[in-house]
Structure formats: C-alpha cells, structure tokens
C-alpha cells in the first residue's frame, strides 16, 4: 500500500503545462528510491495519516523531467509557503498593466521571499487583491488551484493587518493551503520560464534565492558545497512546509515537503538531505530518523 501511494499522481500531472502526457507519469526508478528513503526515515505512519506529503522533480535534463510523489494531491495547511502566489500574482498584474514594477515593489517582494515578512506579505496581498490572486491561481493558464481536482495552492487570508481575511478554499476549507504537487508545478514553471513570462520567471528565481531564514531545507543542505537554492518555507504550530529549486554538481531538482508534526522542521531538514542524495548521489546518511517513536504522531 505504501508503494502504491507513490503512483497517485493521476490526472494532476496531466495539467502540468510543461510536461506531456507521456512525461507526466511518475518515474518508476525515482518512485522506488523515494519509497526506500521514506521507509528509511520511518515516515510511514505520517504518510498513512495523511500528515506528510512530498514531491520530487529531477530537472537536470529540462526536456525530460522525472517525477515522484507521495500524498502529493493531499491539500495541507502550509503557513507562509503560499506567499509565493502573492508574488507571482503581483507579477501577473504587472504583465497585465494594472501595476508598475518599481524598486520599492521589488524590495517588498524580497522581504516576503527571503525573510517571510508578514507585514510585507499582507501589503502585497492587499495591493494585488484576493480576487485577482484566486482568479490567477484557477485560470486555464496555471490551474495551480484545481477546482476539478484536489485543490492546490490557495491564499485566502493575509498575514495580519486590516481586511486580513477573505475566504477559505472551496474544496478543503483551508486559508493558507498547498498540495505538494501544485507547489512543485509552481517551481517547475518558474524553472522553465513559464511563470508569468521568461523575464519575470528569472526575476522570481532571483527573489527566492539567498534565503535569510536558514532552517529546514536550507539547514539540511548547509554542508553541501556550492549549493544554490531558491525556496520558500512556512511554519505555524505543528504545520511545516518547504519547497524550492536546488542546484549543485551539475544536477537540478525541485523538492517539496509538507508535514504536520511538532518536529516537522527537523523532519524536513532530514528529508532534503535524503532527496539530495537520491538526485545528486553522495554518502549514505547517518541515522536520519532518530528513534522510531519520534515520527509516529
């Protein structure tokens, strides 16, 4: 049953704009390695409880992405991770001519992406508008929130300040939500220059680079030489999320992890070390999971 969950990509990958129907199928070898890693890290209890989700995309060969995922269509609370869609929607509004991309706007985006500033995130959301964010997420161009499927990325609440609340997502009743799969699609579109357009995809890659919060994925890759990471994380109580594009040693991949657990930050730190080993090789890990009881909640 555990291995079977890895193949539950079904129709979701069919809407990935950068993948053909043939390429959208999960890669059997990558699935097998991911299953082995999750068993090694003793994550099966969280998987079975639908409190853990992961997506992994090897984009070293941009023409032939390889995909693996588990619980990747399970929408979970993702805290600050959905701030990525406020920035993307801001660039869409610039492209549409409704906003002007100024140095001040860029600095605001940088503070949201690299420091996860709640104040600036709320300013961006109010500037773009909840309705515009939802329109862009559900548009045929993106379908980053799939009304006919399991949802995806959703931003129905700001992060403090006036007019903070709009509405929860219509399928799962979550205010700041994500699926691992749709988050992976977001970064895949960015990597391939299709998030807004090539110019703004490159700009977003730069904005999400050089993170100032050095935990989770960043901490897990701290000892990897010459690693580059463009990412966004999220944390609230027991909910933890991280996602991004990682590059080193000639390899490039997208990793997404969502988890509900009091030690979720540590779980994601250890997860990314294992995912990096799958894509880039390297030594066998130390005891990444620790005592088995740690991950049973």
Image: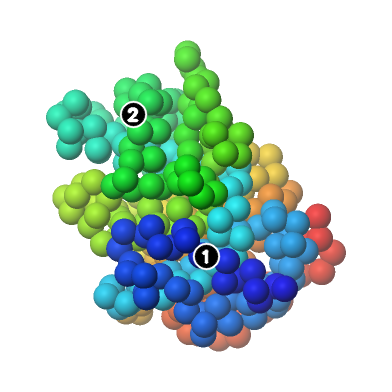
Residue 291 x/y as whole percent: 81, 69
Whether residue 229 appears in this view of the structure is no
Residue density around tag 2, few if under 14, some if 14–19, many if 20 or more, within 10 Å: some
Q: Earlier in the sequence, mark 1 or mark 2?
A: 1
> What residue does disc 2 label?
132
Q: Nearer the viewer, residue 137 or 85?
A: 137
Q: With respect to residue 249, does 272 lie above or below?
A: above
Q: How many marks?
A: 2
Q: Nearer the viewer, residue 70 or 79?
A: 70
Side of 88 where 83 appears, left or right? right
Q: Quadrant of residue 294?
A: bottom right
Q: How is the image coloured?
A: rainbow
Q: Nearer the viewer, mark 1 or mark 2?
A: 1
Q: Quadrant of residue 19?
A: bottom left
Q: Nearer the viewer, residue 156 or 81?
A: 156
Residue density around tag 1, few if under 14, some if 14–19, many if 20 or more, within 10 Å: many
> What residue does disc 1 label?
9
Q: Quadrant of residue 133?
A: top left
Residue 120 x/y as whole percent: 39, 28
Residue at image coords 47%, 34%: 155
Q: With respect to residue 217, does 90 lie above or below?
A: above
Quarter in which the N terminus is drawn: bottom right
Residue at image coords 38%, 40%: 137
Residue at the front extreme, as displayed: 148
Residue 296 x/y as whole percent: 81, 60
Q: With respect to residue 85, does 11 lie above or below?
A: below
Residue 289 x/y as whole percent: 72, 70
């Amino acid at each position: 049953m555990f291995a079977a969950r890895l193949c539950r990509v079904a129709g979701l990958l069919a809407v990935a704009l950068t993948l053909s129907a043939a390429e959208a199928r999960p890669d059997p070898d990558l699935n097998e390695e991911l299953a082995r890693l999750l068993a090694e890290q003793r994550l099966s209890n969280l998987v079975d409880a639908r409190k853990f989700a992961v997506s992994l995309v090897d984009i070293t060969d941009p023409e032939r992405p390889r995909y693996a995922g588990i619980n990747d269509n399970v929408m979970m609370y993702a805290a600050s991770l959905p701030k990525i869609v406020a920035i993307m929607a801001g660039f869409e509004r610039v492209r549409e001519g409704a906003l002007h991309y100024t140095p001040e706007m860029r600095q605001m985006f940088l503070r949201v992406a690299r420091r996860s500033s709640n104040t600036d995130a709320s300013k961006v959301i109010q500037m773009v508008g909840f309705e515009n964010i939802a329109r862009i997420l559900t548009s045929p161009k993106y379908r980053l929130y799939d009304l006919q499927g399991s949802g995806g990325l959703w931003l129905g609440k700001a992060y403090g300040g006036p007019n903070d609340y709009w509405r929860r997502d219509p399928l799962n009743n979550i205010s700041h939500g994500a699926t691992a799969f749709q988050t992976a699609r977001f970064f895949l579109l960015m990597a391939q220059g299709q998030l807004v357009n090539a110019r703004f995809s490159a700009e977003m890659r730069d904005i999400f680079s050089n993170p100032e919060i050095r935990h989770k994925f960043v901490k897990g890759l701290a000892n990897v030489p010459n690693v580059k990471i463009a990412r966004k994380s999220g944390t609230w109580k027991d909910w933890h999320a991280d996602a991004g594009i990682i590059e080193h040693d000639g390899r490039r991949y997208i990793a997404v992890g969502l988890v509900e657990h009091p030690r979720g930050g540590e779980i994601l730190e250890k997860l990314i070390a294992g995912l990096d080993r799958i894509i880039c090789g390297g030594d066998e890990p130390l005891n990444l999971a620790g005592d088995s009881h740690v991950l049973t909640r």
